[in-house]
Image (cartoon, rainbow, N blue to C red):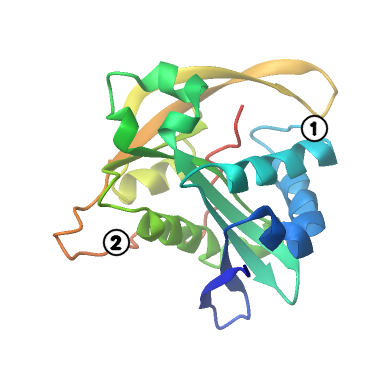
């Protein structure tokens, strides 16, 4: 099976959906480099080994009902990505949100990033919209995500896009650029998905000049 072309932008960036680990083979090395670069920057300053970044891609492609979207320039150069999985596949997140959302009918925006040279182009907003539209709304009614508790531009963007601050926080450990392991605080946002009977698309009202990190599995 080959990847699915979702959209090609005027600037030549193609938005692709990958369905299997085999689909990812041509893009794997570029994805790993982009993943490491993006999450080495503030606010997370993480040091990630190539095997860890590759493992993230593989795990999401193997997840039932997972959605993996890449933004690709040229043949195989990954400039952005976004992934989402059913919340039931993430026990660590389920523990934090049980009783607050319908676990069996909720998707989790697990990861997203855009290379610095491609920010301020609307690419981050498009990666959000594509995933929202790809979620099966006959089976899923909610989406949740985890972002930095700093309430930065990304946080404000999600609020404008209809996400709500859940008032729930989580301390997440990670290896930082100095080699030490420390925790940083994340908060959860949620959004109710439109009913398939509504016939309405998700609104694209976010700020295209920001990039968003919903974070990889912590």
Could you say which quadrant of the image residue 104 lies in? top left
Q: Residues within 10 Å of mark 2 (few under 14, many from 20)?
A: few
- Expressed as whole percent of the image width and height from the top left, the position of residue 197 reads 14, 59
Lower position in the chain sequence, tag 1 or tag 2: 1
**Residue at image location 83% in from the left, 41% down from the top:** 50
Marker disc for residue 84: none
- Which quarter of the rendered picture does the N terminus lie within? bottom right
Q: Is residue 22 visible?
A: yes
* Residue situated furthest left in the rendering: 197
Q: Is residue 42 left or right of residue 109?
A: right
Marker disc for residue 47: 1
Vertical position of residue 179 compared to residue 113: above or below: above
- Expressed as whole percent of the image width and height from the top left, the position of residue 51 reads 82, 38
**Residue at image location 34% in from the left, 19% down from the top:** 98
**Residue at image location 22% in from the left, 53% down from the top:** 194
**Residue at image location 68% in from the left, 45% down from the top:** 58
Vertical position of residue 118 compared to residue 47: above or below: below
- Expressed as whole percent of the image width and height from the top left, the position of residue 20 reads 62, 56
| Nearest the eye: 43 or 169 | 169
Give the residue at mark 2.
Answer: 203
Q: Residues within 10 Å of mark 1 (few under 14, many from 20)?
A: many
Vertical position of residue 75 compared to residue 122: above or below: below
Mark 1 → mark 2, Cα distance in angstroms: 35 Å
């Amino acid at each position: 099976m080959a990847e699915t072309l979702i959209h090609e932008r005027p600037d030549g960036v193609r938005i692709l959906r990958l369905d299997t680990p085999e689909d990812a083979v041509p893009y794997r090395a570029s994805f790993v480099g982009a993943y490491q670069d993006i999450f080495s920057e503030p606010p997370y300053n993480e040091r990630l080994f190539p095997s860890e970044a590759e493992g993230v891609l593989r795990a999401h492609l193997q997840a039932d009902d997972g959605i993996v979207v890449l933004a690709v320039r040229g043949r195989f150069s990954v400039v952005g990505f976004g992934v989402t999985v059913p919340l039931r596949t993430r026990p660590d997140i389920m523990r934090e949100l049980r009783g607050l959302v319908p676990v069996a009918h909720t998707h989790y925006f697990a990861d997203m990033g855009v290379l610095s040279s491609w920010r301020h182009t609307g690419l981050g907003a498009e990666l959000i919209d594509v995933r929202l539209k790809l979620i099966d709304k006959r089976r899923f009614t909610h989406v949740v995500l985890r972002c930095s508790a700093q309430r930065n531009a990304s946080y404000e963007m999600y609020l404008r896009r209809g996400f709500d601050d859940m008032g729930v926080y989580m301390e997440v450990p990670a290896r930082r650029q100095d080699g030490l392991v420390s925790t940083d605080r994340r908060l959860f946002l949620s959004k109710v998905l439109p009913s398939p009977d509504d016939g309405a698309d998700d609104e694209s009202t976010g700020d295209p000049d920001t990039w968003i990190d919903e974070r990889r599995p912590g």
